Amino acid sequence: MANPKIDLSGKKALVTGAASGIGEAVAGYFAEMGATVAVCDVNSNKLAAVARTVGARAVSTGDVSVEAEADRLVSEAVDGLGGLDVLFNSAGVADILSSLEHDMERWDKIFDINLRGTFLMCRAAGRVMVPRRSGSIINVSSINGMRGFPRRAAYGASKAGVAAVTRALASEWGGAGVRVNALAPGYIRTAMVDELDREGKIDLKRIEGRTPLGRLGLPLEIAHAAAFLASDLAAYVTGVLLPVDGGWDSFGGAGEVATA
């Protein structure tokens, strides 16, 4: 696919969840577009390989849902990069489970990582960006946080919370020149989605048939949208929840999309 160019030269960016999937694609694309990148994840082995590929200036392993670790991850990125202009919050987990069987331990884990972790990283980055009166934070919500999906009560609620936190911080920090936006990916071809398909928890053929563009998205396509929000081209964009979903949310039908 075409790889459009967005100038991120001079930007110092931290990417969480960078060891795989969307986070890995974003870290690589940011670096390709000229940003100096720091990466973090809980998976140190995979993270090391990604860091080598993108030439990361700072590499940290840690759990974004733990307050002290979130603060440390941002602090180490600032030290390694010499500042922080962009935070891309990609760390997250998904689960598909009947609400009648959903135990609260799994519920809490999803909320801790997806929502608490997102806020903690935003807060830590905000403490750097707000005094400097400049910065861009990009969170990852989901189409699951915009509409009702069966067996996604915890995941959907956590991602709706990410959207709410994004709007609140954008409103609170806009006067200090810090922009906060969120992406709402649809079904993206990642290892996590492929695993759900193998386990029979989702049907990729049906998903493709219901998506107006007729296919799953690619991690790089999320990276393109993230780069726009990180760049000076989006200087007047804040508080936005941007679907990157091939038209999934716009299509109101339950069956397959009619072809032209």
Image: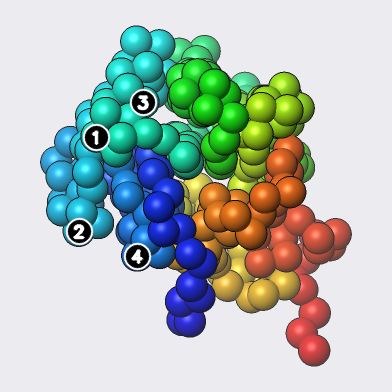
Task: Using the image, tell me which numbered label, if any, was put on residue 80.
Answer: 1
The image quarter containing residue 147 is: top right
Task: Using the image, tell me which numbered label, if any, was put on residue 129.
Answer: none
Q: Tell us which disc is closer to us: 2 or 3.
A: 3
Task: Using the image, tell me which numbered label, if any, was put on residue 53.
Answer: 2
Residue pushed farthest right?
252
Residue 191, position as x, y percentages in the image: 36, 54
Q: Tell us which disc is closer to us: 1 or 2.
A: 1
**What residue appears at the point 42 percent right and 49 percent down from the top-left corner?**
11
The image quarter containing residue 165 is: top right
Q: Amino acid at mark 3?
A: Val
Asked whether residue 156 appears in the rendered view, the answer is no
Q: Looking at the picture, tell me which residue is in the foreground, 143 or 27.
A: 27
Q: Amino acid at mark 4?
A: Glu
Q: Which residue is mark 4?
A: 32
**What residue appears at the point 66 percent right and 66 percent down from the top-left corner?**
246
Q: Which residue is mark 3?
A: 74
Mark before the other along the chain sequence, 4 or 1: 4
Residue 225, position as x, y percentages in the image: 58, 59
**What residue appears at the point 81 percent right and 63 percent down from the top-left corner?**
251
Residue at mark 1 to residue at mark 3: CA–CA distance? 10 Å
Q: Secondary structure at mark 3?
A: helix
Q: Could you classify mark 2 by the number of other residues whose Cα lies within 10 Å: few (under 14), some (14-19), or many (20 or more)?
A: few
Q: Secondary structure at mark 1?
A: helix
Residue at mark 4 to residue at mark 2: CA–CA distance? 11 Å
Residue 194, position as x, y percentages in the image: 40, 57
Mark before the other along the chain sequence, 4 or 2: 4
Q: Tell us which disc is closer to us: 1 or 3.
A: 1
Q: Amino acid at mark 2?
A: Thr
Mark before the other along the chain sequence, 1 or 3: 3
